[in-house]
Image (tube, rainbow, N blue to C red):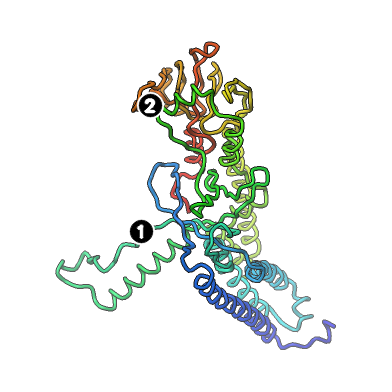
């Protein structure tokens, strides 16, 4: 069949390029049709079903670096057609890369070129075409995958019905360039009209780019054990508030001194109250997700730097300098694999191990001291502080006093004594009454078998220890 297949030398490359063009046009047309349908469906849904419903809700975000930021959560629902179109773009990306490999290989074997009735010039055209398609798609998907994924979902006006939630940071508008003055211009001179238009256009593009890169797509999960809808974002658990119709972070609480002492006199929480609180807040643990091997590699090589390295390496291979190109490509792969698996992923494993804390604690429930695992501690629990053990949660000393080592927080090696909050109406809770998760109790004295009592005010990732871990995982503004 190959011997009888007659095709002019240059027409081979033109035919492949034409095929790629037709495939891209069809893909763009299908995507455009879906986006038109999505727009019409969204307008109809918002007007007819949820006239008074606003899909966007403010997100109560606890920043790890204590910098106040505004986040918005918006509901989306997966569409089979939209998901298929999105995955078809990924398939197109893979096919383009295979095209690069195949055409580059053919260019080094004259026998294959002769069998296809073409030459090097006829093969290099589809190879370059495939390179352009692959690297443009790779750069776009790696930088804007979250935004593109939402484009192929249907906006859900009612947030509790959403299958996915997009968390978007509200970024400030880009600085207006029309007020900028060239160093060579006098202050009273104005920027030319054409230059002003370019500046305004540039400001709009910068704002759109920053907005598109500040989105995070998370999947809503239904916890069958606890019976609630929730999702995890920056290690914090967000649970659906049915009354407000939005997701709220759980793991922190506030009590007055009178309420704390009343809780102590009442014999702590009842078993039913503790069970209900556990269903609401979830286990007292800091969940640090460690990605798998393939996911770690995909995250590493999705960086734009590797895309630029790929362009350079394959350019050498295409233009007959295969030895330099292969060495360049091999070094890039080795460096990326080593960094992804032996630096980044290993560091994530260490952080996950540091975040994991499992111990046995005694809590006061229904007037009795019972022993439970530290993951079962809930907000409002009264704990008996034992010596030599790290505290499983943040809390306030209600009775007795403790001496703790807070070097993990402050770096100060000297132990610090914590005192009970006063049983006086309007008494203020200060740092001298507060103890923090992860700090080690060196001495505990109090009326309950010689031990102090602490009321849990923070559990999970919203403890002080959780905040430190989140600062390591998310050192910059969340994108």
Task: Give neighbour class at mark 1: few <14, some 14-19, many 20+ (Cα, 10 Å).
Answer: few
Front residue of 393 and 112: 393
Q: Residue at x 16, y 71 (%)?
A: 189
Q: Secondary structure at mark 1?
A: loop
Q: Secondary structure at mark 2?
A: helix
Q: Which residue is mark 2?
A: 431
Q: Is 168 placed above or below 152 here?
A: above
Q: Is residue 367 visible?
A: yes
Q: Position of residue 36 (x, y in %)?
A: 55, 78
Q: Name the quadrant of the N terminus.
A: bottom right
| Among the 4 quarters of the image, the one containing residue 372 | top right
Q: Is residue 391 visible?
A: no
Front residue of 433 and 406: 433
Nearest to N terminus: mark 1 or mark 2: 1
Q: Is 166 placed above or below 283 here?
A: below
Q: Is 398 placed above or below 84 here?
A: above
Q: Residue at x 32, y 71 (%)?
A: 200
In the image: residue 434, left or right of residue 80: left
Task: Please give the label number shown on residue 312.
Answer: none
Q: Position of residue 24 (x, y in %)?
A: 62, 78
Q: Residue at x 62, y 64 (%)?
A: 78
| Among the 4 quarters of the image, the one containing residue 109 | bottom right
Q: Position of residue 40 (x, y in %)?
A: 54, 77
Separation of disc 1 and disc 2 at Cα? 35 Å
Q: Which residue is mark 1?
A: 172
| Among the 4 quarters of the image, the one containing residue 201 | bottom left
């Amino acid at each position: 069949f190959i011997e009888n297949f007659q095709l002019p030398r240059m027409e081979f490359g033109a035919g492949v390029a034409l095929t790629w063009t037709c495939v891209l046009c069809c893909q763009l047309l299908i995507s455009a049709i879906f986006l038109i349908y999505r727009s019409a469906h969204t307008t109809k849904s918002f007007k007819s079903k949820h006239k008074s419903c606003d899909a966007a809700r403010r997100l109560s975000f606890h920043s790890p670096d204590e910098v106040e930021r505004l986040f918005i959560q918006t509901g989306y629902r997966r569409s089979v057609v939209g998901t298929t179109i999105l995955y078809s773009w990924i398939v197109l990306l893979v096919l383009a890369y295979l095209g690069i490999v195949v055409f580059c290989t053919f260019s080094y074997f004259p026998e294959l070129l002769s069998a296809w009735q073409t030459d090097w010039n006829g093969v290099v055209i589809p190879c370059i075409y495939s390179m352009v398609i692959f690297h443009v798609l790779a750069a776009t998907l790696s930088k804007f995958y979250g935004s593109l994924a939402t484009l192929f979902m249907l906006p859900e006006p009612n947030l509790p019905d959403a299958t996915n939630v997009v968390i978007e940071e509200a970024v400030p508008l880009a600085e207006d360039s029309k007020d900028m003055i060239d160093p060579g211009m006098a202050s009273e001179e104005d920027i030319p009209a054409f230059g002003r238009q370019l500046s305004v256009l540039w400001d709009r593009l910068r704002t759109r780019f920053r907005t598109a890169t500040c989105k995070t797509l998370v999947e809503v999960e239904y916890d069958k054990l606890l019976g609630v809808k929730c999702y995890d974002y920056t290690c914090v658990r967000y649970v659906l508030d049915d009354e407000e119709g939005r997701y709220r972070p759980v793991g922190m609480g506030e009590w007055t001194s009178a309420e704390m002492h009343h809780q102590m006199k009442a014999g702590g929480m009842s078993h039913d109250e503790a069970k209900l609180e556990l269903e609401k807040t979830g286990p007292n643990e800091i969940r640090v997700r460690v990605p798998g091997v393939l996911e770690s590699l995909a995250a590493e090589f999705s960086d734009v730097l590797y895309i630029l390295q790929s362009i350079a390496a394959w350019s050498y291979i295409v233009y007959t300098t295969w030895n330099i190109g292969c060495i360049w490509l091999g070094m890039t792969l080795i460096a990326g694999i080593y960094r992804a698996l032996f630096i980044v992923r290993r560091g994530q494993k260490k952080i996950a191990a540091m975040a994991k804390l499992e111990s046995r604690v005694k809590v006061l429930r229904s007037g009795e001291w019972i022993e439970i695992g530290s993951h079962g501690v809930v907000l409002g629990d009264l704990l008996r502080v034992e010596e030599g053990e790290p505290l499983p949660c943040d809390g306030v000393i209600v009775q007795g006093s403790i001496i703790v080592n807070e070097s993990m927080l402050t770096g100060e090696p000297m132990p610090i004594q914590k005192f009970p909050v006063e049983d006086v109406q309007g008494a203020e809770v200060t740092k001298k009454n507060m103890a923090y998760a992860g700090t080690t109790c060196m001495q505990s004295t109090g009326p309950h078998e010689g031990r102090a009592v602490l009321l849990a005010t923070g559990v999970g990732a919203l403890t002080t220890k959780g905040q430190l871990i989140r600062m390591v995982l998310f050192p910059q503004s969340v994108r």
